[in-house]
Image (tube, rainbow, N blue to C red):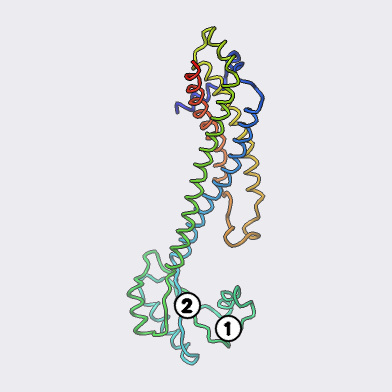
Amino acid sequence: MKILNRLLELLAGDPQADRAVPPTGFTARLTLLSSGAMAFLAVFALALSLATGRLADRWSAELAKTSTLRISAPQDQMEAQTRAGLTVLQSTPGIAQARPLTDDEQRELLAPWFGPDLPVETLPVPQLIEIIEDSDGYDSTGLRARLQAEVPGAVLDDHTRWREPLVEAASRLRLLGFVSMLLIAGATAAMITLAANAALAANSQVIRVMRLVGAQDIYIARAFVRRFTLRALIGAAAGTFIGTLAVMLLPSADAAGGFLTGLGFQGWHWLWPLVIPILAAVVAFVATRQAALRTLKEQS
């Protein structure tokens, strides 16, 4: 809160102190360009973090409450084994629904590997039964024991070995996005510090004259902090706008498909990019203030 109050005070400025900081030059261009580029990258890092978070939640929700029973048996025993499996599933507490997949549904599942015209009716393809759990879930260990005794050709897949790696991968991608944002903030602070140090060194004569007329270091530092903070804010706002526009122009979920589905912002998450310029201004404020006070102390 204290930092935000100081940022608001900087907006008023001081024309006398501002003369110590050149309004243009390579330091101004460096600050604008670096803050804009980093804000652009931050938008995509933020989009990646939010998208992978949604992806992990969706995968976990979709796979957590569903299971599959695979029945492998000779063709003349397939129907009897399927009925026996359904009987076991329907009498198991925690299972809300169990139904065998139709030939068309199984053909659709195998289409990515064997094409859309696979004759599943004439092939020894295992019968799949879709299991949907209720809110309490079922005892997978006990169900496997019953199936082994009553339906020897049945194999229960509760999707654990599929769900856990996918959710873990999405969670790590989300963490990678946040780490990227921290690295972007650190790189922005480093570049703004270098630009501030260069401006202080280039204006050492002006600073010396200001000290002769009674200006204190905090007064001079405030001028540098204000100018560089505003530059970072303007550059980050431009970079955020371009980055958000680029995210909006990404292919839609239907066009991208697969892993790219949902990449970007959704709902109120579109408000998150508005925070990036404010954070860039805070980073510039802290970095420039520390650099200015340290350099002025060394020059005294």
Residue located at (67% from left, 50% from top): 249
Labels 2 and 1: the sequence-earlier one: 1
Residue bearing the label numbered 1: 120
Distance between mark 2 and mark 1 Cα atoms: 15 Å
Q: In the rendered image, which quarter contains the N terminus? A: top left
- Residue, disc 2: 129
Q: Nearer the viewer, residue 86 or 38?
A: 38
Amino acid identity at mark 1: Val
Q: For the residue labelled by badge 2, is the local secondary structure a helix, a strand or a loop? A: strand
294 above or below 78? above
Looking at numbered disc 2 in the image, what kind of residue is underneath it?
Answer: Ile
Q: Residue at left 58%, top 47%?
A: 44
Which residue is outermost to the bottom?
76
Determine the secondary structure under disc 1: helix
Q: Nearer the viewer, residue 114 or 196?
A: 196
In the picture shown, does residue 43 fall above or below 34?
below
Where residue 84 sits: x, y (%)? 41, 84
